């Protein structure tokens, strides 16, 4: 037996439409107020002419300089009354009087339609109830999408609608709360925690240490009883803390399955900047993203804190960090890092001991800014240094402010402990001069395995 599908039509209001008129003037100027009187009179006249109109109310917002929906008390009252089912039809003079822009107009119209209310724009002759006008509105919507500012408005509206419709997760993101009509309002106590986590992370603290400290201090985590590593990672990666929204990170497969799928490029993603108030300063947020990438050992060795700032003086390839854990010198295990030209396509002809390099950086910074740094961290390198050029004897720093500083690298045994590093280093330089295979050092740096994976 074949199934028949019949569309259920909404019952038409048999008799009269309950009509509301909306008027707005933007200033207190007499001429404007006069025009307001005219608007109201026109509506009364029109209603009297038409037998099927029952003019329920005239909503007037006057003398307001601001155009945001929030400031328009009567407008909001009208929407509330529509929501309560008291009105069937709204008459207004023009689109510009109704809302501040196309997007607002559309969003309001859509909202009203969801309550079964249609709108008539007198000047434009658009009645949202008829099909042709619906098309005009759709065209207007496509124009609206061209404006980036409007897209942001659309996003906020879209999020709010999804939220209202129950599609969006109702539990707000840690650090934020939702009000009835706004999302991503800052929750002060949680926001302070978020801020602290970002700052500590950017200042070089490991996520694990931050996490343990949070738990020890009894600070409530976003979920569960104690902080988890994943929560910290997710927090640091979340663009909403910088005030942005990335749209379509996930999407619903189709209307039948309602399965949520992560968007890996099947649909476009939109990054909307400054969609709401930020918790974290954008500069700190950006640095945190870079650090996150440097610490991502899944794609190879950690390149923290220098990232790609260090280049091989011989072939120009970025230096990679190795632990040198496998190196024994005179039966003693050397446990420290080095930066060498052992990445993809590297010539293998350069290596610098981490201690020597770090010490040179701290010293240069102290000489320039009169402040002693305990450790080398990405945030201050990134804030102050444009490039770091190395060779066997010296380091050249091009500072962000335009200064250049050349200093000798100090390999003397007294300058750093333990002295076996310098022995190792000098030995290494000798071997390079003699043309000893570079792969040996690749292995010593613990890099052989990871670069084999990288191809
Ligand atoms: Zn090289």
Image (cartoon, rainbow, N blue to C red):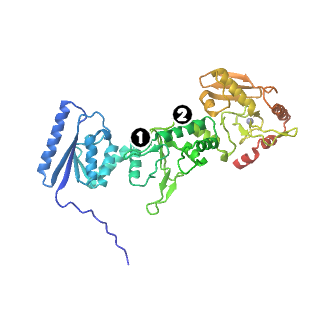
Q: What residue is at 17 percent from the left and 40 percent from the top? A: 39
- Residue matched to label 1: 148
Label 2 to label 1: alpha-carbon separation: 23 Å
SS class of the residue under badge 2?
Answer: helix
Q: What residue is at 53 percent from the left and 37 percent from the top? A: 195
SS class of the residue under badge 1?
Answer: helix
- Of tags 2 and 1, the one toward the viewer is 2
Name the foreground residue: 64 vs 352.
64
Residue 247: in sight, yes or no?
yes
> Is residue 186 found left or right of 290 in the rendered image?
left
- Residue matched to label 2: 283
Residue 62, placed above or below residue 394 = below
Q: What residue is at 76 percent from the left and 44 percent from the top? A: 446
Q: What residue is at 44 percent from the left and 52 percent from the top? A: 168
Measuring from the top left, give residue 141's x and y in whole percent: 35, 47
Q: Quadrant of the N terminus?
A: bottom left
């Amino acid at each position: 037996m074949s199934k028949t599908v019949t569309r259920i039509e909404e019952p038409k209001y048999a008799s009269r439409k309950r009509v509301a008129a909306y008027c707005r003037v933007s200033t207190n100027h007499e001429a404007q107020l006069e025009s307001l009187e005219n608007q109201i009179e026109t509506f009364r006249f029109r209603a009297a002419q038409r037998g099927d109109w029952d003019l329920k109310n005239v909503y007037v917002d006057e003398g307001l300089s601001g155009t945001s929906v929030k400031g328009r008390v009567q407008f909001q009252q009208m929407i509330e009354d529509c929501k309560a089912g008291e009105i069937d039809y709204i008459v207004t003079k023009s689109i510009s009087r109704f809302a501040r822009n196309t997007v607002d107009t559309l969003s309001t119209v859509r909202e009203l339609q969801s309550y079964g209310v249609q709108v008539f724009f007198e000047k434009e002759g658009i009645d949202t109830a008829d099909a042709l006008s619906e098309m005009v509105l759709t065209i207007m919507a496509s124009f609206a999408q061209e404006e980036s500012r409007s897209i942001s408005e659309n996003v906020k509206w879209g999020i709010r609608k999804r939220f209202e419709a129950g599609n969006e997760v109702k539990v707000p993101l840690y650090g934020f709360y939702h009000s009835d009509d706004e999302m991503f309002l800052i929750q002060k106590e949680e926001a302070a925690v978020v801020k602290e986590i970002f700052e500590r992370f950017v200042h070089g603290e490991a996520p694990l240490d931050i996490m343990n400290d949070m738990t020890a201090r009894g600070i409530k985590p976003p979920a569960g009883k104690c902080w988890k590593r994943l929560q910290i990672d997710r927090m640091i990666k979340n663009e909403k803390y910088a005030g942005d929204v990335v749209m379509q990170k996930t999407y619903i497969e189709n209307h039948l399955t309602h399965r949520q799928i992560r968007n890996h490029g099947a649909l476009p993603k939109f990054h909307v900047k400054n969609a709401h108030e930020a918790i974290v300063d954008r500069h700190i947020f950006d640095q945190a993203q870079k650090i996150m990438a440097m610490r991502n050992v899944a794609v190879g060795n950690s390149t923290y804190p220098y990232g790609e700032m260090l280049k091989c003086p011989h072939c120009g390839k970025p230096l990679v960090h190795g632990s040198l854990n496998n190196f024994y010198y005179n039966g003693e295990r050397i446990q420290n890092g080095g930066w060498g030209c052992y990445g993809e396509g590297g010539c293998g002809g350069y290596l610098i001991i981490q201690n020597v390099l770090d010490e040179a950086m701290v010293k240069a910074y102290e000489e320039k800014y009169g402040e002693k740094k305990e450790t080398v961290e990405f945030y201050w390198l990134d804030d102050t240094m444009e490039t770091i050029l190395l060779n066997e004897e010296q380091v050249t720093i091009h500072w962000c402010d335009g200064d250049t500083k050349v200093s000798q690298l100090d390999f003397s045994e007294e300058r750093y402990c333990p002295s076996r590093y310098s022995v190792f280093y000098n030995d290494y330089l000798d071997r390079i001069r003699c043309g000893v295979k570079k792969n040996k050092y690749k292995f010593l740096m613990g890099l052989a395995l990871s670069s084999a994976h990288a191809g």
